[in-house]
Each structure stands twice: as structure tokens, then as C-alpha cells.
Amino acid sequence: MKSFKIFALLTTMGFAIAWESQAQIRINRPERVIERQAENRANRRIDQAVDKGFDKLEEGIGSIFKKKDKKEEVKKEEGGNNGNGTAETSESQNGGGRMSGGDANDQAAQGAGSEKAAFKSYSKFDFVPGEKIVASEDFSQDAVGDFPAKWNTNGSAEVVTIEGYEGKWLMFNQTKSASYIPDFIKNLPDNFTLEYDLIYNNLDKEYAYQQWLYTAFYEAEKNDANIQSESGGRGAVFGINGGMGSGSVSLVQTDPNAYRTDLQGNRDMANVINPDNNGKIFHVAMWRQKQRLRIYVDDLKVFDLPRIFPADINLNAMRFHSSLSRENDQMFVSNIRLAVGAPDTRSKLITEGKFVTTGITFDVNSATIRPESYAVLKDIAGTLSENPAVKVKIIGHTDSDGDDATNMALSKKRAESVKENLVTEFGIDKSRLETDGKGETAPAAPNTTPEGKANNRRVEFVKM
């Protein structure tokens, strides 16, 4: 009888461990609060039963199992999550001069060595964000469970928080063909950049149906024209495909009827887009220069088509479009940032005496520079190397979210982090660099809109 109890207990423990190992992304929804409370109560009862089972096991087989230290158990319950990204997070606020994106828990776990390696992996990354942010979307103004107020769709999607991840995300679910259109993005000039963070979940090599997410820029009389199509009209469409774990990307030109033309490219990315990366945050960046379009996924330039846009096109809309076959298929986007204008580091720093950039970004509430800032820093370092007599002061700025004193300290730390990066990564003499921080005290724009806050989170280089 005792051996049967031992077998049953170990079987139950094995099932629990197996279930936990298969868990991937956990979405936090308000309607699940009551259900979650019931689950917690049930889990506490299971824990009590397991503890009793361990007591019995100790009686039967001596020192094979040891009782858990009860004081340690109480300490764990009181302390909660220790930064491993497993505890349920509340709806994040855009505090402390937040820069877009990033899993802060994951970043902390990686350590300084991994951060340096990640930054080095961007050594061939040449993406430089536009000079002025004209649209910024992190869904902070939208309620969890709602479709975002400033968007249009013919399908369904909802704003969610994800356990272990910062901020809010727009989640696309099972759909045959649905468009998600940010109504606030209208005119796309000859030179612009678009960036966003992407997470996919439940990519599966065993399932052969579609798992597509498209990003389209197009010309149309109405931004919701051909709303059931990948594009609304003449333009270009970038697609990410994870169906059957295939892992590929495409870039195609579309005609005025939103049909594909013969100008298109395809690329196998099975080593990046695959089930092993379910839950990973990818950073997607797109850079238009007149007819040319470059596409980047993390540190990899996946496309560079010099004539993807017709010379006479007037881009005035963009959309996401998804085709997801299964009920549990999920795509998430957040931290969308549209910027216009081509930064001219050399001219502005040397001739005008000041260069300001929002292209150096940091982890949330941190002075850790994100790897996708590499090209901007490289450009600044190049300007300083070409002008060895020039000295500059690096000044950090934040938005107004969070505590004033905290923002001031954070802005100073970020300026120091930029200085250290220029010295260690690019060999700039540290005697040429001074630092300062102004926190939220010198805004470049009102802190009343996402775009205003994004433009206030900046780094300034002033010639001395």
C-alpha cells in the first residue's frame, strides 16, 4: 500500500513538471481573475497534499527525501518573483523615461557578458532611425481586453499583458485574413523608418497551415481599401511566415489593385523563425529611402530592394495583416515607432554644434543600451574620429513619467553609459567626452502624447 502511494505521488509530480515544461506564453486577462483565484486555491491544496506526501515518504524511506525548510518556504512566498520572469506582472506603466521594448527580466538574467556579446552581434547593423518620431504606439492608453481605440480592423485582436514581459501588446489570434490599420499613420515621406517589437507563439513544425504576419505600406484613397488583402493598394508588403515551422520571410511589390507583381524576394530563415523561438522578442526595423526599402530582423538585414517602390508613388497608409490557422496561434506587436527625416550627424554636430537623437535606446528603467542602437553610435563615433579636435558633452533626457529625482539620476546614468560605449566599443578618447543629465526638465515636446514622450527620451551631443 505504501509503495502504491509513493508511485501515485511521483506520478502526480511528474505530470506537473511535464505540464510546466510545455507552458509558453501566459496572457493576463481581466476575465481570468476569478478563474486564477480558483486555480491558486486548488494549487495551494495540491501543495499541501504534496507536503503531506513528502512527510509520508520520509517516514517510509528515511533520508532519501528531506523536508523543505519551512522558513525558506515562507520567505519565498513573501518575496515573490526574484527576477526570473515567471511571476505574473501587472499592467506596466511607461515610467522612468522608458525606452521602447525589451524583456527586462530576461535582460537582467543574461548578465553583462551577454549584453556585450549581443551588442557586438550588431557590428554590421547599418539601420539608423529617422530624426523625428511622428507616431509611437505602445497601447498604454488602451484597456486590457479592448481593441485599440486608434486602430481599425475587419477582424479581431485585443490589447493584452504577457506574464514576464514589459508593457502591453496587441495580440492577433486565429483569423483567415484580417487587417489591423493604425488610423494615425497617414503620410509616409520619401525617407522614414518604422520599428516594432514582435513575439510569436505556438509555431509548430507538425502543422502545415498558415502562420503569416504581413506589414504593408501602400497608396490608396482610403486606408481601409481592400481590407481583406495584405495591402490596400500600390506599395510593398513584408511577410513573416512560421507555418509548419518553415521559417521564411518575403518582400513583394503590389499594384493599385493590391495584387502582387513579379517584383518580389523570398528568404529562408528557418534558423531564426522556428518553434524554439516561441516567446522571443524580435525587433523588426524598416527603412525607406525614396524607391529603396531595407528590412531588418534583429541584427540581420533580410532585404535591400532598391526599386521596390515606383518613383511616383505617394505612400499614405500602412497596415498589419495576419493569417493564423489555429485557435492557439498568436502574434504580438508593440513599441511601434515611425520616424521621418534622415539624420545628418556630421553636419549637425560639426557645423551646427549640436546633434540630438532618439535612436539610442535603453532597456526599461535602465542605462543598458539596446543593441539596435549600434549604427547610431557608430555614426557618432565616426564623426568624432574624423574630427579629433572636437570635444562633446553627452546629455541624457527622459520623459515625465515616474519620479523627478529618479528620472534625473537615470538620465545621468544613460549619458555615462553612452560615453562608456563610445570609449570601449569605438576607441574614442574619454578625455574628449563629458556627460550630464537633465531628466524631464528640458522637454523637446509636450509629454501629453506617446509621440511627445518618445521625442523627449533622447540623447543630446553638444560640441564644446
Image: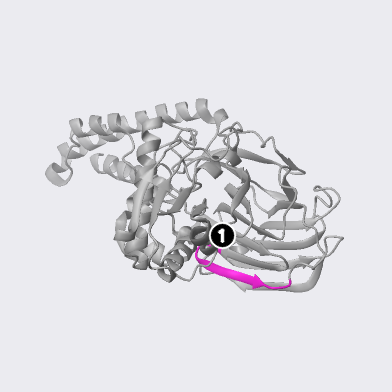
Question: Quadrant of the image for the C terminus?
Answer: bottom left
Question: Quadrant of the image for the N terminus?
Answer: top left
Amino acid on which disc 1 is placed: Asp
Q: Nearer the viewer, residue 316 or 88?
A: 316
Residue 306 magenta-highlighted: yes
| Residue 201 shows in the view | no
Helix, strand or loop for the magenta stretch, by majority = strand
120 horizontally vs 125: left or right: left
Residue holding disc 1:
204
Q: Position of residue 48 (x, y in %)?
A: 30, 30
Residue 1 magenta-highlighted: no
Q: Nearer the viewer, residue 220 or 374?
A: 374
Q: Give the residue furthest to the left.
A: 63
426 horizontally vs 297: left or right: left
Q: Position of residue 420 (x, y in %)?
A: 33, 57
Q: Position of residue 57 (x, y in %)?
A: 20, 39
The kind of secondary structure element at disc 1 is loop
Q: Position of residue 193 (x, y in %)?
A: 62, 57
The structure residue drawn at horizontal position 60% and vertical position 56%, both measured from the top left corner, is 130
Give residue 252's quadrant in the image.
bottom right
Segment colored magenta: 297-307
| Residue 117 shows in the view | yes
